[in-house]
Image (spheres, rainbow, N blue to C red):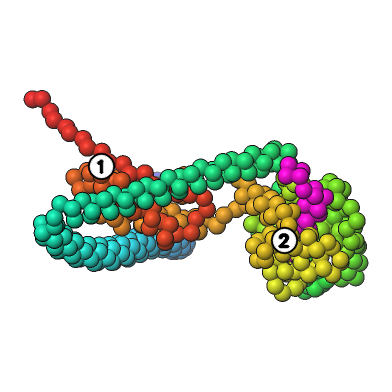
């Protein structure tokens, strides 16, 4: 039992020891397992971390690559935009530079044009100066020639005087007395001639005064209105669109109107206006009336144009007939042939130097009648001749020859009085007047034409006359300056006081007047005034 117990105790101890050992081994195993598990866990964690980091890194790398691609794309887009913007800016800069270049080029061209104009003006001024110098050289040459001639004459006169003095020195007292008496007699003859001339001028002045009184009375009792016309007529349009309708398709309407009337139509940039151009005033009036009718009617085509031209022709013919009848009624002349009355009416559309011929004829008839009544001759004959004196101007563009001859032929054709025919033929001095009435018609015609404002004188002829007056005065020695004034009726000459004295001034005025009478044709008379002034200036210091 004891043994058993011992053995049992021993076995228990063994068991305990085995259990302890087992426990200890088990604890070591657990620890080892734990350590292994930890190591494994660590390894697994490391592997997981590595994997996670790898995945994270791969994700980051992928996102980085995407970000890089996005950045690259954005950079590429931005660079494209900047490139386009840079291109646009470059284009704008190029355009601006081109505009600057064009502006500079234009300014340089303008400057060149201005310089060219200045050069041309300088050349013209130089040409004018050269012409002036040439003229001065010619004048100097003429003056030199005249001086040589004058010197030669003076030398001859000196020789003659020397010879005369030598001859006188040899004369006796009686011979000298005889010579003196002869010279005195010659001087008296000259004075007598001067007196006779003065009396003749006085008588002429009195006659001119009487004539002027008669003319002034006639002019005061007769006043006619004048209308200035030219070779063109203007037709107003309601709008500029009407110009296209007047022209028509392919110009049919305007060609038809020009063919039917014989008048040129000028359609230009003038707003709301058409110009009719032609020398025949009657045809121009027909064209004007027809065009106004077409514009008011609104239907413009070739057939309508021809119809309106025919109506306008009839209307203008009636107007001319009425104008002729009114003229005869106003003047108080009756029994004129109807064709002559119609020709008188044509003068309503005829002008001469800007003066209406019909109004001029009426005025001449009234003036001639008044002067005839003052002189006691046939008033009706004077009026009739005055009214018909320019009848030839009604057809002078259709018939050859001067209007005087044409008018006389027309008066013969329609059996006018021979005195009327003579007055028509003689009112410009082409034939001799055979009656007082013819002279009165010529005088009335001159009065009507010479009335201020009745006719327009050629500006060129007016300036030429003034220039020639000044050139004549400047051609004399001692003349400093000269001025043509009073519309060429007076020349004022300023002379050099050291070269021209008071006695020489009288001679100079006489010489200037004589040369003007010789070289110029002028109406009325020209007055020459010599101005000689001496000024002495001193200063008190």
Whole-number angstrom distance, CA of label 1 to CA of label 2: 51 Å
Of residues 37 and 183, the one drawn nearer to the viewer in this rendering: 183
Q: Main secondary structure of the magenta part?
A: helix
Q: Position of residue 416 (x, y in %)?
A: 84, 63
Q: Which mark is residue 502?
A: 1
Query: At x 73% / y 42%, what residue is drawn?
Result: 374
How many numbered circles are shown?
2
- SS of the residue under disc 1: helix
398 sits to left or right of 153:
right
Q: Which mark is residue 189?
A: none
333 sits to left or right of 154:
right
Name of the residue lying farthest toward the top: 540
Q: Is residue 475 visible?
A: yes
Query: At x 28% / y 46%, what residue is drawn?
Result: 505
Q: Position of residue 124 (x, y in %)?
A: 35, 64
Of marks 1 and 2, the one in the foreground? 2
Name of the residue lying farthest toward the left: 541
311 sits to left or right of 73:
right
Quarter of the image containing the C terminus?
Answer: top left
What range is drawn magenta here? Answer: 373-393
Q: Position of residue 130 (x, y in %)?
A: 29, 65
> Residue 51 appears in which quarter of the rendering?
bottom left
Q: Which mark is residue 434?
A: 2
Q: Position of residue 358 (x, y in %)?
A: 76, 54
Query: At x 75% / y 73%, what residue is drawn?
Result: 399
296 sits to left or right of 70:
right
Q: Is residue 119 visible?
A: no
- SS of the residue under disc 2: loop
Of residues 251 and 378, the one drawn nearer to the viewer in this rendering: 378
Task: Please tell me how crowded label 2 is: few (under 14), some (14-19), or many (20+) other residues with Cα within 10 Å.
Answer: few
């Amino acid at each position: 039992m004891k043994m058993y117990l011992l053995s049992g105790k021993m076995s228990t101890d063994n068991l305990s020891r085995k259990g302890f050992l087992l426990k200890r081994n088990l604890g070591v195993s657990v620890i080892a397992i734990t350590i292994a598990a930890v190591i494994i866990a660590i390894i697994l964690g490391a592997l997981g971390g590595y994997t996670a980091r790898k995945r994270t890194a791969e994700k980051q790398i992928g996102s980085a690559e995407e970000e890089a691609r996005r950045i690259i794309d954005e950079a590429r887009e931005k660079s494209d935009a900047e490139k386009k913007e840079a291109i646009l800016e470059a284009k704008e800069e190029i355009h601006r530079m081109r505009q600057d270049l064009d502006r500079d080029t234009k300014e340089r061209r303008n400057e060149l044009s201005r310089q060219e104009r200045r050069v041309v003006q300088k050349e013209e001024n130089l040409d004018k100066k050269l012409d002036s110098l040439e003229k001065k050289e010619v004048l100097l040459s003429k003056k030199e020639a005249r001086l040589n001639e004058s010197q030669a004459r003076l030398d001859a006169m000196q020789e003659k005087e020397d010879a005369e003095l030598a001859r006188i020195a040899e004369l006796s007292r009686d011979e000298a007395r005889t010579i003196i008496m002869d010279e005195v007699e010659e001087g008296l003859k000259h004075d007598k001639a001067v007196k006779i001339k003065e009396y003749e001028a006085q008588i002429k002045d009195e006659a001119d005064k009487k004539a002027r009184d008669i003319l002034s009375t006639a002019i005061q009792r007769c006043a006619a209105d004048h209308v200035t016309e030219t070779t063109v007529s203007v037709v107003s349009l309601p709008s500029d669109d009407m110009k296209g309708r007047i022209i028509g398709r392919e110009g049919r309407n305007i060609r038809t109107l020009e063919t039917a009337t014989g008048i040129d139509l000028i359609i230009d940039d003038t707003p709301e206006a058409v110009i009719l151009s032609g020398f025949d005033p009657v045809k121009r009036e027909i064209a004007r009336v027809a065009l106004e009718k077409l514009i008011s009617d609104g239907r413009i085509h070739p057939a309508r144009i021809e119809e309106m031209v025919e109506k306008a022709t009839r209307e203008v013919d009636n107007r001319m007939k009425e104008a002729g009848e009114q003229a005869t009624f106003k003047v108080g002349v009756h029994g004129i042939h109807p064709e002559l009355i119609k020709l008188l009416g044509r003068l309503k559309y005829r002008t001469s130097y800007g003066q209406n011929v019909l109004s001029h004829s009426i005025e001449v008839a009234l003036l001639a009648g008044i002067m005839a009544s003052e002189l006691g001759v046939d008033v009706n004959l004077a009026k009739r001749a005055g009214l018909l004196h320019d009848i030839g101007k009604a057809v002078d563009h259709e018939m050859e020859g001067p209007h005087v001859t044409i008018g006389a032929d027309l008066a013969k054709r329609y059996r006018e009085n021979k005195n009327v025919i003579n007055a028509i033929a003689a009112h410009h001095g082409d034939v001799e007047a055979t009656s007082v009435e013819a002279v009165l018609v010529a005088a009335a015609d001159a009065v009507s034409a010479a009335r201020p404002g009745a006719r327009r004188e050629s500006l060129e002829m007016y300036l030429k006359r003034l220039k020639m007056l000044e050139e004549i005065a400047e051609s004399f020695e001692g003349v400093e300056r000269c001025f043509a004034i009073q519309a060429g009726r007076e020349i004022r000459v300023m002379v050099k006081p050291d070269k021209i004295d008071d006695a020489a001034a009288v001679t100079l005025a006489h010489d200037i007047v004589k040369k003007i009478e010789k070289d110029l044709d002028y109406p009325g008379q020209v007055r020459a005034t010599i101005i000689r002034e001496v000024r002495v200036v001193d200063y008190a210091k």
